[in-house]
């Protein structure tokens, strides 16, 4: 079955450490996104990518970095510059945003990675 | 600015009908979407309104009025499994960013 796989499900980071969250999709979707969710809050966009080798900053990109070397993969690195990284991270994808009818199918989300600073 | 407002919590009894409202401050967007998220899980897409009016999908219906900058999600014949958070979302024209509301936590009581 097609879907998005995020790993690991739980991740613990020490102060000053960089960590990378994996996101893989087999939906043949062009666009991929990273969102951060804090308790009791909505989703905030970190980065998004519309095509391979291209990505754009979202609303809260500081302290994060991404790459999009393959259509299927969009890993997120949480760097030591991110001072408050403890949160639930969600990866999502959609088919090409320029394609008619895309909105009607919404985003497909992965099951998330819960990152905790220890 | 661009923002969506939802009530933080709603409580209803099993078998009842509940309406979750979403008001927005923006112009030029493609439509209003709704997502469901159970605790610790991923959001799942429920519905999308491109045009004004009511869209029905089983027990769930969603409504949009662009003139009133308002939409809602209607859940009928509530079940315990409907206890979850519900988010409204819009994507703005001229961009590729979707904005999500803060979510409404629905508690269904027996």
Image (cartoon, rainbow, N blue to C red):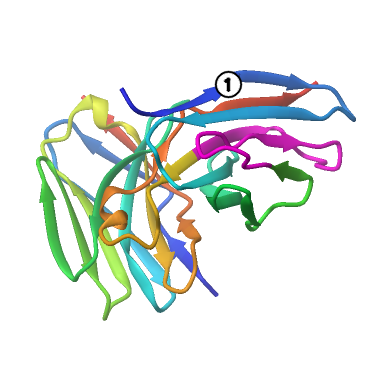
In the figure, residue A59 lies in which quadrant?
bottom right
In this orientation, which residue lies closer to the viewer: B10 or A29? A29
Q: Residue A10 colored magenta?
A: no
Task: Identify which residue is drawn at 24% across, 38% down.
Answer: B12
Task: Identify which residue is drawn at 61% across, 27% down.
Answer: A22
Q: Decide: few, some or many residues near mark 1? Use Cα within 10 Å; few <14, some 14-19, many ≥20.
A: some
Side of A16 relative to B105 (left or right): right
Relative image position of residue B86 (x, y in whole percent) = 35, 44
From the viewer's perspective, is residue B65 above or below residue A117?
Answer: below
Position of the N terminus of chain B by quadrant:
bottom right
Task: Specify the principal SS of the magenta part.
Answer: loop
Give the total number of marks visible in the rendering: 1
From the viewer's perspective, is residue A40 above or below residue A18?
Answer: below
Relative image position of residue A38 (x, y in whole percent) = 60, 40
Magenta stretch bounds: A67-91
Q: Chain of mark 1?
A: A
Classify mark 1: helix, strand or loop: strand
Relative image position of residue A75 (x, y in whole percent) = 63, 34
Q: Residue furthest right?
A: A16
In this orientation, which residue lies closer to the viewer: A29 or A6? A29
Q: Residue A87 colored magenta?
A: yes
| Residue designated by label 1 | A7
Side of B28 relative to A9 (left or right): left
In this orientation, which residue lies closer to the viewer: B38 or A26? A26
Relative image position of residue A50 (x, y in whole percent) = 52, 54
Task: Identify which residue is drawn at 27% across, 64% down.
Answer: B71
Side of A93 relative to A19 (left or right): left
From the viewer's perspective, is residue A87 above or below residue B32?
Answer: above
């Amino acid at each position: 079955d097609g879907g998005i796989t995020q790993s690991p499900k739980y991740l613990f980071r020490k102060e000053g450490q960089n960590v990378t969250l994996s996101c893989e999709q087999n939906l043949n979707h062009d666009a991929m996104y990273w969102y951060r969710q804090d308790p009791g809050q909505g989703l905030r966009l970190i980065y998004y990518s519309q095509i391979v080798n291209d990505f754009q900053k979202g609303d809260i990109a500081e302290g994060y970095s991404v790459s999009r070397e393959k259509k299927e993969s969009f890993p997120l690195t949480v760097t030591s510059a991110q001072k408050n990284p403890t949160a639930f991270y969600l990866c999502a994808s959609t088919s090409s945003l320029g394609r008619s009818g895309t909105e009607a199918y919404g985003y497909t989300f992965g099951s998330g990675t819960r990152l905790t600073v220890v | 600015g661009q923002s969506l407002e939802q009530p933080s919590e709603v409580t209803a009894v099993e078998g009842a009908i509940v309406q979750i409202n979403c008001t927005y401050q923006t112009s030029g967007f493609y439509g209003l979407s709704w997502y469901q998220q159970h605790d610790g899980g991923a959001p799942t897409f429920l519905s999308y309104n491109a045009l004004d009016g009511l869209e029905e999908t089983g027990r769930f219906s969603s409504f949009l009025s662009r003139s009133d900058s308002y939409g809602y999600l209607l859940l009928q014949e509530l079940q315990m499994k409907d206890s979850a958070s519900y988010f409204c979302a819009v994507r703005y024209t001229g961009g590729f960013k979707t904005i999500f509301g803060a979510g409404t936590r629905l508690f269904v009581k027996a």
